[in-house]
Image: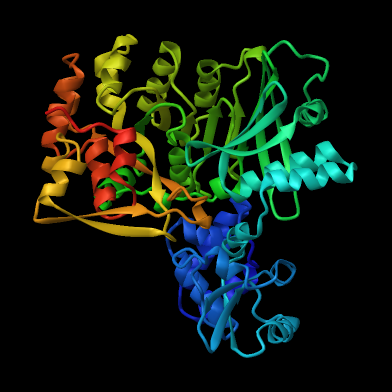
Amino acid sequence: MQIDDKKIKKVLLDGNYVTADDITKAEAATKITQGSIADWLLTSEIINKDLLGQALAEADKVNYSDLNTYKPNQEQVRLLPEDIAKQFHAVVFRQTDKEIVITTDNPTQDELSKKLKTIFKDKKIVITFSFTEDIEDAFIHYLKTLDTRFSEIIKQQKRIAPELIEQIIDDAVAYRASDVHLEPQEKEVIVRFRIDGVMQEAGRIPKEYYGNILNRIKVQAQLPIDEHFSAQDGAARQVREKYTVDMRISILPTLNGEKVVIRLLSSYVRSFSFSDLGLSQHDQDLLLKAINKPFGMILVTGPTGSGKTTSLYALLKLLNTPDVNITTIEDPVEYKMAGVNQIQVNTQTNLTFAKGLRSIVRQDPDIILVGEIRDQETAETAINAALTGHLLLSTFHANDAATAIPRLLDMDIEPFLLSSTLVVLIAQRLVRKICDQCRYSISVNKEEVKKTIPADVQKYFTGKHIVLYKGKGCSGCGNTGFRGRTAIYEFIEVTPDIQDLILQHPSTAQIWKVARKQGSVTLFEDGLEKVKSGVTTLDELLRMAEPPKF
């Protein structure tokens, strides 16, 4: 969030939104993290985004428009010509027969009012404040299709490869894609984005231009351009006027040519905070208690792409204060965080998770993050680190929280060491969120429940009428009905009862039986609460989690 620190301090203190002590803490923290005061206050949950928006709006003597809650649709956005919208960073927030509300990140611009009066001659014009990033999200409605822009670039015959790549990355960032896939076919190259975990075709490029595109990507990633028959991995950074995005690049030879997958690590991922995790109040309290312990191990389990690393970094943001030392070892380092010592695994120099972790422990940091526990050596080193006065966070591949314990014991970890160090086990999956812009409710009666809801799920819905939610599909969500993702969770707190059980080499079922008595809920049950509150759909939940078999 790019807002001047001096302005933030004055506005928040003058309006009594925060105390002088809060600002002092924020200034001390940002000297270490090199972030902004606004970001620190938001991450620490001293103030929320709505209150910050209202405070900044008051300073400019205007109202605040929340573009996250009330997202403008394509028809609204296009009421303002694209060149004017982007020149003044403005978007139409609301309109009636007599009035139009235009929101901008700089309401004091002199020329804006004059320009708006020439466009909306018969209406009263009201100008409000919104955050820059929210306004830019709305600009997605101005985008032409990639195929249209590809055709325009190819007709110009100038910088074809660089411009095609720029357009692809621009769109991927605008649509908040996590991956870009360039898939060569016999006569063309298909461009696909992974958006909210689901692949979507974005456009097609004539194959004759792919060689130059491929070479440019390789040069940016510092990979050999004359190698076409082996797998290659690299990294690059795309710096544009509106954003900077770090990219992990993987290239594999296929029968039709080299396939490229670009993993995008953009600022919208880095801004993720603890309050964005989608935790229930009970789980929030449990996790806050766990990370405030002086030592012990917190494990997050789940398959690849389930958001484990993102969750751990949201916790690191809370823990990253001037009075603690944090060191991570990762493969690769995905999110760069100021104030944290981050180490990249490098097999060529024999810097593995286990060896790197041993060296980290010798430097005695307060908090350690291990990207992944993959083998017995790393597991033993991690547990010893947690036992000797360090708070250790890590990820582990297991289907659910309870399965992590038998899996670690199968790696010949001593039961008494494991029971002494484990603090909390978390399993998570990501589900797509219903688009706020086109969400609608459906009332289902008892007879319809029997027809539309699977038999093993019907017992979770009681009452004469059940309300479910769906997305109709709109321009804001690419007609999918979904926009963004949230996590569903399974928490097991390692209490004295669980510690005693670990000493007996328990099965997953035995662990879950005790955890259940303590109040733990399954991934499905946690997700069901999100279904009932309209965050996601039942079909989406069933795609990611099964009802418990007990």
Question: Going 14% across and 21% down the picture, which residue do you hit?
Answer: 510
Question: 491 or 451: which is nearer to us?
Answer: 451
Q: Is residue 433 left or right of residue 317?
A: left
Instruction: Mark yes or no: residue 371 visible.
Output: yes
Q: Position of residue 438 (x, y in %)?
A: 42, 59
Q: Is residue 12 left or right of residue 409?
A: right
Question: 11 or 83: which is nearer to us?
Answer: 83
Instruction: Mark yes or no: residue 461 visible.
Output: no
Question: 7 or 242: which is nearer to us?
Answer: 242
* Quadrant of the drawing holding the C terminus: top left
Q: Position of residue 92 (x, y in %)?
A: 58, 73
Question: Going 48% across and 37% down the picture, which residue do you hit?
Answer: 198
* Quadrant of the drawing holding the N terminus: bottom right
The image quadrant that residue 356 belongs to is: top right
Above or below 444: residue 372: above
Q: Is residue 442 left or right of residue 305?
A: left
Question: Going 45% across and 27% down the picture, which residue do you hit?
Answer: 304
Q: Position of residue 302 (x, y in %)?
A: 37, 28
In this picture the colour scheme is rainbow
Q: Position of residue 422 (x, y in %)?
A: 30, 28
Seen from this angle, which residue lies furthest right? 158
Question: Going 48% across and 56% down the picture, which residue do you hit?
Answer: 474
